[in-house]
Amino acid sequence: MKILGIESSGLVASAAIVAGDILVSEFTVNNKQTHSQTLLPMIDQAVAMSGIGLEELDGIAVSAGPGSFTGLRIGSSTAKGMALALGKPVVPVPTLEGLAYRLAYADGIICPLMDARRNQVYTGIYRFGEDGVLECIWGQTAADISEVIQRVNELGEKVHYLGDGTAVYSEVLQKETNIVFDIVPLHLNRQSAASIAALGAVYLQQGKGIDAKEHVPVYLRQSQAERERAKRLSENSAKTDGGKLG
């Protein structure tokens, strides 16, 4: 099975080709350039260097969210456009599952942390069964960092933290986690298209591929612009109601 993986949910932009049990090519950057600048050239390079033609792909796996609203839109629109043109299925891979899959067969539990601002993280809690299957203990959500640590502590197992949230919340992780834990080293700590492609291949075999037209990103919460608009509408409504009462 040949899968193109696309990852643009956070600061990292990444594209990879997986064929069977081989990672054929992968390009990853974390250089603060916008994904609109980097993603398509990286996909072109990943495909060209792999020697696998686009028509040979069985599907296109994409990090489906949560994450950066702009990054998710860029990745999703790229995957959908390519899949429609090629007549291939899209395989949506939840971002936190893709991140956790980087630590396949790790002992204990895995807790990805993506900085969601406002003292929150996008997170979930996972473990790997003896057969290597990724098991979900707490499905991906947006939560306060202290709530996440409390849940981890209650499980009482060794935990591996990873993701860009580990740098933002390092101090509170050190202070509040009262079980054995580690923060995953840099070469495994961020999102990876290879992980998205590998897990996407598993999900495609499980029948989780969808028509490109059906794919929409998973945001989990409103964007800042949507929150500000809702706030303005609420304030305007309150002023109007106040005027009527007067």
Image: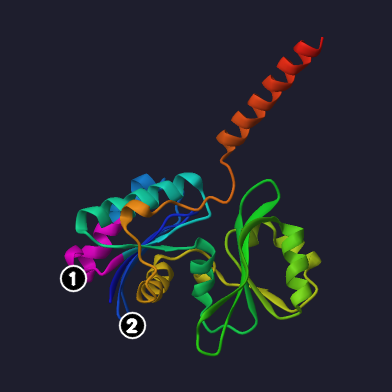
Q: Where does the image place residue 214, in percent across and percent down from the top left?
A: 37, 53
Left or right, 133 with respect to 124, comes to left
Q: Which residue type carries mark 1? A: Gly
- In the image, residue 66 sits, relative to residue 183, either above or below, namely above
Q: Residue at x 49, y 46 (%)?
A: 69
Secondary structure, mark 1, is loop
Q: Residue at x 30, y 62 (%)?
A: 89
Residue 166 picture quarter: bottom right
Q: In the image, which residues are magenta? A: 42-59
- In the image, residue 157 sits, relative to residue 35, either above or below, namely below
Report which residue position mark 1 lands on.
51
Q: Which residue type carries mark 2? A: Asp
Q: Residue at x 62, y 31 (%)?
A: 230
Q: Where does the image place residue 226, in percent across and percent down from the top left?
A: 57, 35
- Whether residue 59 is visible here, answered yes or no, is yes
* Classed neighbour count for the residue bearing mark 1: other residues with Cα under 10 Å, few (<14), some (14–19), many (≥20): few
Examine the structure image and report whether residue 50 is included in the region drawn in magenta. yes
Q: For the stretch drawn in magenta, what is the main secondary structure?
A: helix
Examine the structure image and report whether residue 58 is included in the region drawn in magenta. yes
Report which residue position mark 2 lands on.
21
- In the image, residue 5 sits, relative to residue 18, either above or below, namely above
- Whether residue 33 is visible here, answered yes or no, is no
Residue farthest to the top, as pictured: 246
Q: Residue at x 51, y 71 (%)?
A: 188
- Distance from disc 2 to disc 1, alpha carbons, whole Å, reads 16 Å
Q: Where does the image place residue 116, in percent across and percent down from the top left?
A: 61, 51
Q: Where does the image place residue 29, in percent across and percent down from the top left?
A: 41, 58
Residue in the foreground of this view, choosing between 240 and 37: 240
